[in-house]
């Protein structure tokens, strides 16, 4: 832990060329070296630092990681150091030389370290800094824990000199049988023959990359569509001359027609719930397959077919597990609340995070919605900011639907969803807390929603805090009984919205938030979970499950 950044700036606050990146040890008894990784505390990677040591629970600042390893790099190979995420800013050195930096806490990045590795002992030093900053995305104000560190796996990839850098294999927009995509090779032999194979569908497509390493392709195939009912995945192989990669990919279409969302051409209602990336039971940032299975298992137990992975890109494991289990995903970037819209730095960061999220998950059939923002206050600079993100998302991925969690404008008991950004989106998301921040649960009996945009609406948040096990009269806030009443009233209200095509109440599980100090009840936790952080289901869980059971039984609903 290095709260004053002593490892990279000196006492005049000037950069230190001899900083901790050198991983030095005293060469003689008289040598002054005021740090020592060998005897420093040990942290597990992957994992946030906050939940690993009590003194790190609230820590926000620079922290250093060092890892030594032995290897024998082979000539003609490429070595890439790959981070699935580091929150928030990371600076990486290999054998004392800085190889790169990255900002943004929830998306992957990598550095080619081929020329830096040696035969024998190697050292990697990573400075991770989760200081909240005005110009960062998210900015200083959120309602979640600022878990710091190497929160997801880090790998050293051993690759051929020319390797498959990236690929896109999905159905062409609106088509049920035309697969459209591209492959990109990286390395000194960019022009190669590439074979795309889907053995189960008898696909073997040969293409040639150009001098830029890229090739686009299109072919027809008879493919069983992926859906929550039948999450069919196909083994795919992309075989270039010097490298081959394997993946499991599902094929489905997702479109909007009027106020309907069409999955594989059939209207679907998204029976969902929001989730933070917080580990059930053990606490801290989630990253493992077990975490993903617990969370998605709960979504399934609710009778759900949809999850909103709020408020930033979650780990790739849960998205892949959603592919496998058949759960539709809303994925979002942390453009949240109070970004400084006129500062070019947050815009650049948001664009980068959006591109990195789409780049990672573009082949996941579970992901049907990209969301560009949450509860951002309307203004011309904000609208321009979001329009830029929407333009980027459409250019990067023309196959998926775009949304954002908006906030309606109250006209008495009528809530009007007319945020100008709604016009640019395919699906409107709307967060509302009628009965919690906005009146008492009875208010739900009176409220109605309308919108000038003829588009589907997902109620992307609603809910109430309740402490698991706290019982009392239904008007007593924070009791399970109050939360239960609110869910009943909310559901009755939601059923009256003719253009409603999905619901994602806030939230699956209680999560840590420094904004929630209420003693006894909150103790640093946002208690709007349907399940406590210890896995206890609250009464509202059953209310939502009943509602989703009813929807499942309704003939027009696709499961
Ligand atoms: C919201 C936010 C969410 C908060 C939630 C709450 O509107 O989008 O991040 O945690 O309300 O509990 O207040």
Image (cartoon, helix red, strand yellow):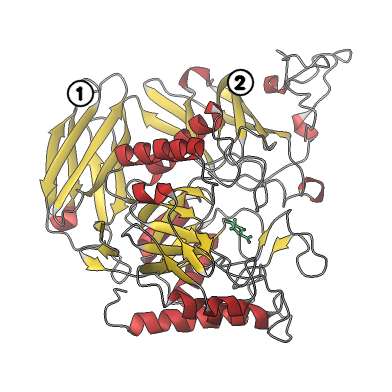
Badge 2 local density, few (<14 within 10 Å), some, or many (20+)? Answer: some
- Dot 1 falls on a residue whose secondary structure is loop
Picture quadrant of ligand 1: bottom right
Q: Which residue is mark 2?
A: 95
Which of 161 and 502 lies nearest the eye of the viewer? 502
Nearer to me, 140 or 407:
407
The residue at 64%/71% (across/down) is 439
Query: Which residue sits at x=36%, y=36%?
Result: 392
**Residue 375 appears at what percent x and percent y?**
54, 52
Q: Foreground residue, 255 or 106?
A: 255
- Rendered location of residue 260, percent (x, y): 28, 65
Horizontal relation, residue 357 to residue 483: left or right = left
Residue under numbered circle 1:
191
Residue 102 visible here: yes
Q: CA distance from mark 1 to mark 2?
A: 33 Å
Q: Where, quadrant-wise, is the C terminus in this rendering?
A: bottom left
Q: Earlier in the sequence, mark 1 or mark 2?
A: 2
Q: Quadrant of the N terminus?
A: top right
Give left or right: position of 16 versus 171.
right
Q: Find the residue positioned furthest to the bottom.
A: 473
Q: Residue at x 72, y 23 (%)?
A: 20
Closer to the camera in the image, 109 or 515: 515
On the image, which quarter does residue 37 sit in? top right
Q: Position of residue 14 (x, y in %)?
A: 75, 14
Mark 2 secondary-structure assignment: loop
């Amino acid at each position: 832990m290095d709260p004053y950044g002593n490892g990279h700036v000196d006492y005049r606050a000037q950069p230190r060329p001899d900083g901790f990146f050198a991983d030095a040890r005293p060469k003689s008894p008289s040598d002054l070296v005021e740090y020592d990784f060998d005897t420093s505390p040990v942290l597990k990677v992957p994992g946030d630092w906050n939940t690993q040591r009590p003194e790190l629970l609230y820590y926000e600042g620079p922290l250093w990681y060092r890892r030594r390893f032995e290897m024998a790099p082979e000539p003609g190979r490429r070595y890439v150091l790959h981070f699935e995420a580091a929150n928030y800013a990371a600076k990486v050195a290999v054998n004392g030389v800085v190889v790169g930096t990255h900002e943004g806490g929830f998306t992957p990045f990598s550095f080619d370290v081929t020329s830096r590795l040696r035969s024998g002992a190697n050292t990697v030093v990573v400075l991770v800094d989760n200081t909240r900053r005005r110009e960062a995305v998210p900015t200083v104000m959120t309602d979640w824990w600022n878990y710091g560190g190497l929160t997801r796996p880090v790998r050293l990839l051993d690759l051929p000199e020319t390797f498959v850098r990236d690929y896109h294999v999905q159905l062409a927009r609106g088509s049920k049988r035309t697969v459209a995509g591209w492959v990109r090779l990286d390395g000194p032999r960019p022009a190669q023959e590439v074979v795309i194979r889907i053995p189960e569908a008898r696909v073997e497509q040969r293409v040639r990359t150009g001098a830029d390493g890229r090739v686009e392709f299109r072919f027809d195939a008879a493919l069983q569509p992926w859906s929550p009912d039948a999450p069919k995945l196909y083994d795919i192989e992309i075989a270039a001359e010097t490298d081959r990669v394997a993946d499991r990919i599902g094929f489905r279409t997702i479109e909007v027609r009027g106020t309907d969302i069409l999955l594989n051409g059939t209207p679907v209602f998204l029976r969902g719930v929001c989730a933070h990336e917080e580990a059930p039971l053990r606490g801290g940032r989630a990253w493992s397959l077990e975490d993903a299975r617990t969370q998605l298992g709960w979504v399934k137990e609710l009778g759900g077919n949809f999850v909103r992975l709020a408020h930033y890109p979650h780990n790739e494991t849960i998205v892949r597990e959603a592919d496998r289990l058949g759960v539709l995903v809303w994925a979002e970037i942390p453009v949240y609340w109070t970004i400084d819209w006129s500062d070019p730095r947050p815009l650049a960061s948001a664009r980068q995070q959006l591109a990195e999220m789409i780049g990672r998950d573009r082949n996941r059939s579970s992901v049907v919605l990209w969301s560009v923002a949450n509860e951002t206050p309307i203004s011309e600079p904000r609208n321009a900011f979001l329009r830029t993100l929407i333009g980027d998302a459409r250019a990067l991925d023309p196959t998926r639907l775009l949304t954002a969690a908006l906030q309606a404008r109250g006209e008495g008991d009528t809530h009007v969803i007319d945020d100008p950004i709604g016009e640019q989106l395919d699906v409107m998301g709307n967060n509302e807390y009628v009965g919690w921040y906005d009146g008492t649960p009875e208010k739900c009996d009176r409220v109605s929603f309308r919108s000038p945009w003829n588009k589907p609406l997902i109620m992307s948040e609603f809910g109430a805090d309740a402490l698991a096990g706290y019982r009392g009269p239904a008007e007593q806030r924070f009791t399970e009984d109050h939360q239960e009443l609110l869910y009943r009233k909310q559901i009755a209200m939601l059923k009256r919205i003719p253009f409603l095509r999905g619901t994602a109440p806030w939230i699956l599980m209680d999560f840590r938030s420094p904004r929630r100090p209420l003693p006894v009840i909150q103790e640093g936790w946002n208690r709007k979970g349907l399940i406590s952080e210890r896995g206890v289901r609250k009464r509202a869980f059953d209310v939502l499950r009943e509602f989703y059971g009813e929807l499942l039984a309704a003939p027009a609903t696709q499961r």
